[in-house]
Image (tube, coloured by chain):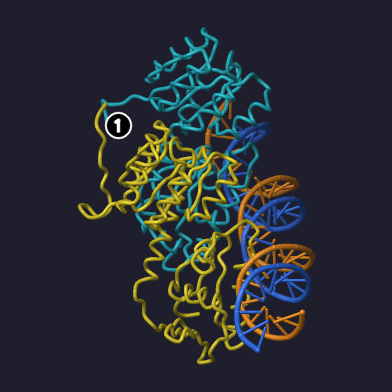
Chain colours: A cyan, B yellow, C blue, D orange
Amino acid sequence: MALSFTLAKKQPGAEMTSILMIDDDVALTQLVAEYLQLDGYQFTAVHQGPEGLELAKSNAFQLVLLDIMLPGMDGLTVLKQLRQHSYCPVLMLTARGDEIDRVVGLELGADDYLAKPFSPRELVARIKAILRRVELVQQQQQPQASSLQVNQLKLDSAKRQISVLDNPLVLTATEYQILELLMRHAGDVVSKEDLSQLALGKRLQLYDRSLDMHISNIRKKIAQYDEGEKIQTLRGLGYLLLQGEN
Amino acid sequence: MALSFTLAKKQPGAEMTSILMIDDDVALTQLVAEYLQLDGYQFTAVHQGPEGLELAKSNAFQLVLLDIMLPGMDGLTVLKQLRQHSYCPVLMLTARGDEIDRVVGLELGADDYLAKPFSPRELVARIKAILRRVELVQQQQQPQASSLQVNQLKLDSAKRQISVLDNPLVLTATEYQILELLMRHAGDVVSKEDLSQLALGKRLQLYDRSLDMHISNIRKKIAQYDEGEKIQTLRGLGYLLLQGEN
DNA sequence: AGCCAACGTAAAGGTTGTGTAAAGGACTGC
DNA sequence: GCAGTCCTTTACACAACCTTTACGTTGGCT
């Protein structure tokens, strides 16, 4: 057999993002269907665990909305089995206050969770956040230039070194990752959420200032050699390394 | 469904790294195919042991992904037979917690193992690590300068001797290998994992401090004659012999 | 202007990786 | 069997690092 599939991502006209919802609440799935279809998503809903699992395993969907409380097969079980085969992003839907389910779910590899009842706007926002991050990750997995230059900053990824005006920076592993990310997306805003997940490997928590500290330290190290080269802050959005003229 | 695509990326027309996957889980092989082809690898999957063994023995592949649980012929058997003919790198795929399989597999000559379920990112990272190490080994097997000098260190590989400021060091075989590796890659970071596999001939285990001790001893011996010549530590990354000015 | 959430950052706290002495094994040659 | 050599493990100290805390500042909002 030929191992084949189309993985085109952004080819216009071709694809639409398909979302699968596994939830026994039929009324809710219909409501969600309306909103997501309005937003241009291809939407499919099933109401039972095993059926959903089969569909999800097919990799035909870019994202799965998974209810924890399911008749027949528990949502966490579905997630666990799905993860044997696929790393398709999963957004869990939980009853409010189900802290344990949330923790277990995230450990099993869910990408996010949302407590019921939720507003459609919130749902769409979460979906978009996950999809955007998945795209970032895929971008990261693709071959990237081993060296690039942004203004006075020079990246040498083979040596894992970044220099300012030819002065090599002494960066910790985390600082390096953050700065590399910013450089590879120079000119674009990189959200704190993305930076946290991609460089620190964890979701950004409320009152988590760790990332801010790393940025602060990176700035300090860059300023040793070049006062002009600045990481810009976009309040509420993220950070940005300006490309081109200062 | 459209037929598969080729995603040449490095040397067009020239060689592409070919990877063979032997796993009866068809859905999984398709998923892996997607990711690896995105990453520019030539990918082939077969679902039965004997068939995979034949293909692997052909030496047409630079790396084999081998599932332990196979119908017909057990993965470990495949590995054992493959090793009679080929030293092609093998990355084992095991069910989580199959500690025994892991140990046996590594003893049979697998290069690494990965517990299912794994994330595509992790898989790609492991594959790259193996291929990079294989390249390092091949590089080592090629004729290399029989003598080279790094700062105050002078290597005479014919005599298997390294001297500091013309004072020959009394090194053990292992110490010599480690220092030679560092010298031949002066200016680059050499990971502890690489050092362990290439100089000690074993994978680095958690809480394994053996390599640290060797480094410590080498440093002590060098310091007898030259306080300035230092093996630098890059926390979490490896060790580095600085090239050029101190 | 005044409020408040987001941000900057110094300092303190906690965690993890590394340095190294010393003890424990494994192996060799006698 | 014993001494010698070498590699590894154990144990503890320390340093580097990441995160949290705390407080000051900024900028958008009404």
Q: Amino acid at mark 1?
A: Thr
| Above or below, comparing residue A190 to residue B86 in the picture | above
Total marks in image:
1
How packed is label 1: few (under 14 Cα within 10 Å), some, or many (20 or more)? Answer: few
Specify whether residue A153 is in view. no
Report helix, strand or loop for mark 1: loop
> Does residue A55 show up?
yes
Residue sitting at x 50%, y 54%: B108
Residue at the bottom extreme, as displayed: B166
Q: Quadrant of the N terminus of chain B?
A: top left
Quadrant of residue A18 within the rendered picture: top left
Q: Disc 1 designates what residue?
A: A6
Q: Percent position (x, y) of residue A206? A: 63, 36
Q: Nearer the viewer, residue B237 or B25?
A: B25
Q: Image height check: is C13 above or below B153? A: above
Q: Residue furthest top?
A: A27
